[in-house]
Amino acid sequence: MVKRLLYHIVLFSCLTSLLHAQNETQLNTALKDSFASGNYNWVASKGGAFLELSDDKNYLDIQVLIGDSYSNTNKEDSSFVAYKLALKGYENLSLKVEQATTNFKIYNLIQGQSNPSIDNTKYFNAFYDYAKESNDPELLGKSYNELGRINYRDKDPYLPKNHFLKAYEYYVDANIPEKQVNALINVGAVYNSRIQKRDSARYYYNKALQLFEKDTTTIKDTNTAFNLYNNIGNTYRKDKDYTTAISYYKKAEQLALKKYPLKSLKILYGNFNAAYYYNNEFKNAYTYLYKYDSIKNEINLADQNIKISEVQEQFDNEKLRADNLEIDGKRQQNKNILIGISMLTVLISLIGFLGYKNTKRAQLLAEKDKAIEQQKVVTLLKEQELSSIDAMIAGQEKERVHVANELHDDLGSLMATVKLHFNNISADKKDNSLQKAKDLLEDAYQKIRGIAHAKNSGVMAKKGLLPSIQNMANTISASNTLAIEVLDFGLEDRLENSLELSIFRIVQELLANIIKHANATKVTIQLTQHKTSLNLLIEDNGKGFIYVPDKSNNGMGLQTIEKRIEHLEGNFTVDSVVGKGTSVVIDIPL
């Protein structure tokens, strides 16, 4: 029995060796075809055999393809290994073009990790140096486009704008319309969010739109047109031209999106809702608010179902490929029966492997569903905690007013009456005891008044929102570790007292977050009062962070602020770049 087992093992090894060269060629072709069809998981699982240092260019090209597949399946560590092996091989062969493109892939891979401990500058510089050396307009366009993105949060907003315009010029020289469109969109974004010149932003957005509609050499990407219409609409909405904004949103709504339709429509419906609301078209605002909530729920359900669809599609593709391999094996059966036996053995092993992998995937899906339910519970608890915090703050403010009124109205009035009667008492002027008693009574009366005013201080006092924020900024700045500048526009009149209190608490919470986490040295607080809204802009030069909307991992502080603003029916936007600082924009209707 043991001898027979050993015999089969040796036979299988011999067959595998005989088929190695032929199967390697077939696998090479299969990897390329699978990657082209988007079946990245299969490429990644089968590509391990190619991950070794080689001086064969075709072999190295396959390694880059495998690295792309690992990247598309969120296996960045394996992708990094594949790219590094390919880069080393290209260097040995002095293939400069391939070196440059691989350096850029490694740069993007590390950039996506947002890990400050890994320096990806050398990879970008290597790519940029080759672009200048070769004077290739496409590579130079890509270089300047990336420089614009790197310097997007620079103090001088015209620096990234000039980079993006330079990228556009090179893409014109390279005659690549779709990249010209993307460069123009980036220029418009700088004018819109950094320079705050929405007329200029609309000029470049419209220029990109005209180029997109004119180009007939590439397949139209409806998502690009969707984003352009939506961005142009946003510029008009910020200018309070809600009617024009809505007209552009409608153009975007009519497009049939090929990529990310649910997420894109969710953003669009939110913009519709805001534009109709501020245009006093409340019926339409409610209609799009309903659409927004509906599609938000649909996205949550789709996120759970899409994993199952991907597994099913992958299984179908792999089964089809297995059938094709089996047919090829039968065609060669007449030439060599041993090859057919080996192919059958490999096929059976592959099916068993796929069954095991599908079982593991099902287990992972079940674990993810369980994690989602647990997260819902955590979210509910946090919302309850927020309600408790709001109730506690309201109680504290109410108690502060009550104590102040008691001190001022009751005890203060009593002391004033005692003082009045005391002044009517006549006594020997040589006896200064009476005067000392009067002085002590005056001190007691003034202390009671001081306590009453102190208890009613802060946002609730007569000084109002702006002086309270300025006082808080001065107190923090006195430590000489964080400089806070407060700018105001149009805050001549007081707001409703509870609204001022809520806004003060929001600013207080944001400053607390900056002090705790941002390592910033400078903060700017800008308050602008319009006729129907109050705008707050809080910027810091700290280390920044990755902000994901509607995610619980942003921290309890931001969740508390979001809930407060939601209660005020306002809008809350966070723009943060790692290493470049954070900007928070808040719009609250009055």
Image (cartoon, rainbow, N blue to C red):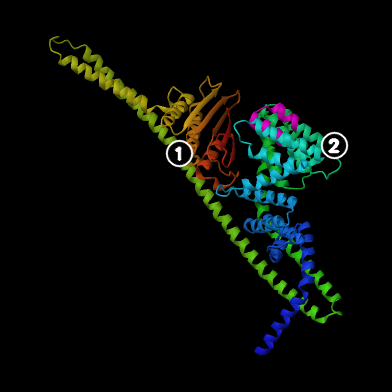
* Side of 461 relative to 494 (left or right): left
* Side of 461 relative to 48 (left or right): left
Tell me the quarter of the picture where residue 140 sits. Answer: top right
Amino acid type, label 2: Lys
Rendering coords of residue 458 (x, y %):
42, 28
Q: Is residue 42 above or below residue 106?
A: below
Q: Quadrant of the N terminus?
A: bottom right
| Spatial CA span between label 1 and label 2 | 58 Å
Disc ID at residue 214: 2
Q: Main secondary structure of the magenta part?
A: helix
**Residue annotated with mark 1:** 391
Per the image, is 387 magenta? Answer: no
Q: Which residues are magenta?
A: 186-204
Q: Residue at x 77, y 47 (%)?
A: 258
Which of pointers 1 and 2 lies earlier in the amino acid sequence?
2
Q: Secondary structure at mark 1?
A: helix
Rendering coords of residue 136 (x, y %):
77, 42
* Side of 464 relative to 425 (left or right): right
- The residue nearer to you, when weighing 50 against 488, is 50
Mark whose residue sits in front, 1 or 2: 2
Tell me the quarter of the picture where residue 94 sits. Answer: bottom right
Amino acid type, label 1: Ala
Per the image, is 203 magenta? Answer: yes
